Amino acid sequence: MPVRGKPVLWIAFSLFALTAAIASSQPPDLTYHTVAPCAVVNTILAGGVFAPNEARTYQIVGSGSLASQGGSSSGCGIPGFSNNIPQVQAVAVNIIAVNPTGAGNLYAYAAGTTAGPSVINFTLGENVANTMPVAVAQAPGIGDFKITVNVSSAHVIVSVVGYYSKDVQTVHVHPVPGDATASGTRLLNALAGITNASATKRYVIKVEPGIYDVGTAGLQMKSFVDVEGSGQNATVIQGLGSNDQNFTTAVVQGASSCELRDVQLKSTGTPSLPYAIALLIPGADTRVRNVAINSSGGNVNWGIRNLNGSPVIEEVDILVQGGSTGYGIVGTGGSGSSLVVRRTTIQVVGANHGQGIFRDLTATSTELRDVQIRVSGGVHASGIKTMLTGPFLITITGSTIEAEGSSGSYGINFDGGGQVKVEQSRVRGSGNGFSYGINGIGSLTVNHSEIIGATATVEAVDAKIGATLLDGGPAFATCAGVYDESYTFFASTCP
């Protein structure tokens, strides 16, 4: 309720106490920030008394002077617009009706709207104050808020004590109809315009349905800025996927503390450049969720390249087609990097040398859960291949990994000084030439799974297999309770 009967001087000194009350009335989904009490409007100093039923528009956000409306000449430190994006949704203000000429009401509301609630009821000659949230305009150039004094005239004094902002700002990007290149430029400009993203000021770029061509430059994501499409079949971000010879560019390049979701990435490649990479994650923990990835057109085509990062990839469909070499995911990484892939489908089709997931250098861990990998149509095929040094751990759970090559194939082929653990999964190597289910150097544990390979089901330096179907060639391992394709049981030996 409005505060009645308090002298103006007393109210001015009580602003600090009132900030606690205003914070308790915080609008939902907004965060309250206090500021030192600051003069915004004083009609005694500028503008003169409000006439009955008069409405005036005032500024409050930004760094400009408020002296022309009786306020602070240096502004009040309320964040303004950034690239036309509003940083503040409402302000906490103390409003005083001074020396009313009769009974009446004072209204405060956002500029650009036509009405707002009554915030003060006053009577003849009585100074009345109230402290409350007031919405501000969400478009630049129209002022920030309005005040209307109804029925009787009065002077008005306004001071600001805080402001409200969203924890997450949303920037909408609309396509240019029929022009994928212009649409891509809009998307690039929207991201470039975000300059103040942080852990406490996150952004979401909401990309509306359409095709956005980002050319050779690609889209460079930013920390604390998520890119969200309107669905895999609705929003397509496409480009060549490379503009150099060093594997350092892609259609989209990830960043730390951000997420790419609900979109399709398409790397079209070009004969003049050997590489086509849809998504590059350099030294970051980018999350990738509900994304379709298509890569083709280059001599070497990559779905995702993880370069020293630790991404989490979930509910992603990757299709890589053609070329001399095709990679679904390349997990190049230094010590401490990791790769998590869940509920994801990887297809590599028609590449002479196809690999669903390839990991090299050093890496701490790789986790695959509910992943479907299918590599086919080439000369050599590997579902998973590693060339790792130092200790590493690869865990595979609830997954299907299949590789079919005309000259040779491996379901899983690993080397280095690490461990591979397979649980409740199906691993198959098939085709002409040699075919291994699992082949490797290092420690291997397989339980409750199905391993298929004509040359050998399992061949590893230190392999232990339990409660597993081994279909095809011999297993060079320690076996416990396994069975072959004829369901012949082997209690303590291998087929």
Image: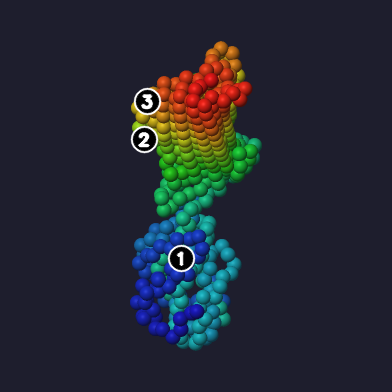
Q: Amino acid at mark 1?
A: Val
Residue 475 numbered mark, or none = none
Q: CA distance from mark 3 to mark 1?
A: 60 Å
Expressed as whole percent of the image width and height from the top left, the position of residue 125 reads: 46, 87
Asked if residue 137 is positioned above or below residue 55 in the image, the reply reads: above
Residue beneath label 2, please?
A: 336
Q: Say left or right for 5 vs 454.
A: left
- How many marks overall? 3
Q: Residue at horizontal 45%, vertical 61%? A: 31
Q: Amino acid at mark 3?
A: Gly
Residue beneath label 3, please?
A: 417
Residue beneath label 1, please?
A: 91
Circles 2 and 1: CB atoms closer than 8 Å = no
Determine whether the residue tagged by mark 2 lies in a helix, strand or loop. Answer: loop
Mark toward the viewer: 3 or 1:
3
Determine whether the residue tagged by mark 1 lies in a helix, strand or loop. Answer: strand
Mark toward the viewer: 2 or 1:
2
Expressed as whole percent of the image width and height from the top left, the position of residue 353 reads: 53, 18
Expressed as whole percent of the image width and height from the top left, the position of residue 109 reads: 53, 68
Q: Residue at horizontal 57%, vertical 19%? A: 472
Q: Amino acid at mark 2?
A: Gly
Residue reaching furthest to the front: 491
Determine whether the residue tagged by mark 3 lies in a helix, strand or loop. Answer: loop
